[in-house]
Image (cartoon, grey):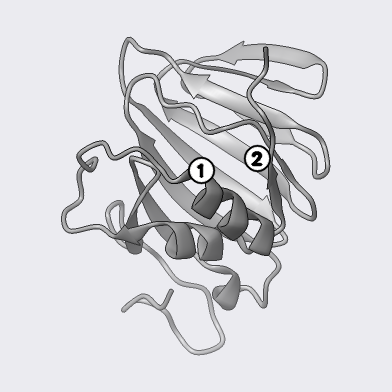
Amino acid sequence: MTSDSQTRGGGFVIAADEGEAFWFLNTLTINKVGCGDTDGRLCIVDHRVPPGFAPPPHIHQASDEAFLVLDGEVEGFCGDQEWRVDPGSLVFLPRAIPHGFSVSAAGPGRLILVLSPGGFDQFVAAAGEPAQALRLPDPVPPDPAMLAQLAAAHGIQILPPPR
């Protein structure tokens, strides 16, 4: 991602709605800092999700993940630990540990995700489509086989849902 405010050899500033916006698994996900901006060291995405959103349980094989909850109530698990958090909370999910989360049905959620090393931004671009507007997309059921294949290509293992 290259911002108009990026300076050669320096940092850059990205405004609230700037970045590469994708409709990804029925969310609006904006890649704010791509792994191309950091020599692969990290990526940062703005993940805007509908009420009740829950990605399938999964494992990031090589990346640690942290997310800051800006809006919504989120509950989830990491390994054997279960948690519930509100806006302002930060969740850390270490690499190679199964995890998942869901956003309350009471309202939409907004999370800032940081993954290190980067690459999740590339998964978003591969599995999503460029957003036509900065809004949540009309819901479309994902293709589980395609999602699993793209996830695996980006170091993410999709797990079966818990029983």
Residue 127 spot, x, y in % from top left: 45, 58
Q: Is residue 4 left or right of residue 133?
A: right
* Of callouts 1 and 2, the N-terminal one: 2
In the displayed structure, 73 sits above or below 122; it is above
Q: Is residue 49 visible?
A: yes
Q: How many marks?
A: 2
Q: Is residue 68 left or right of residue 12?
A: right
Which residue occupies the foreground of this view, 158 or 105? 158
Residue 99 spot, x, y in % from top left: 70, 30
What residue sits 74% from the left and 53% below the top? 63
Q: Is residue 32 visible?
A: no
- Tell me how far mark 1 sits from mark 2, CA to CA: 25 Å
Q: Nearer the viewer, mark 1 or mark 2?
A: 1
Secondary structure found at label 2: strand
Residue 148 spot, x, y in % from top left: 60, 49
What residue sits 56% from the left and 87% below the top? 9
Mark 2 highlights which residue?
66
In the displayed structure, 35 sits above or below 7; it is above
Which three-letter amino acid code belongs to the residue tagged 1? Pro
In the displayed structure, 54 sits above or below 20; it is above
On the image, which quarter does residue 135 sit in? top left
Which residue occupies the foreground of this view, 7 or 134? 134
- How packed mark 2 is, by other alpha carbons closer than 10 Å (few <14, some 14-19, many 20 or more), is some
What residue sits 37% from the left and 63% below the top? 14
Secondary structure found at label 1: helix
Quadrant placement of the N terminus: bottom left
Which three-letter amino acid code belongs to the residue tagged 2? Ala
Q: Is residue 32 left or right of residue 157?
A: left
Residue 75 spot, x, y in % from top left: 57, 15
What residue sits 20% from the left and 39% below the top? 138
Q: Is residue 139 left or right of residue 90?
A: left
Mark 1 highlights which residue?
144
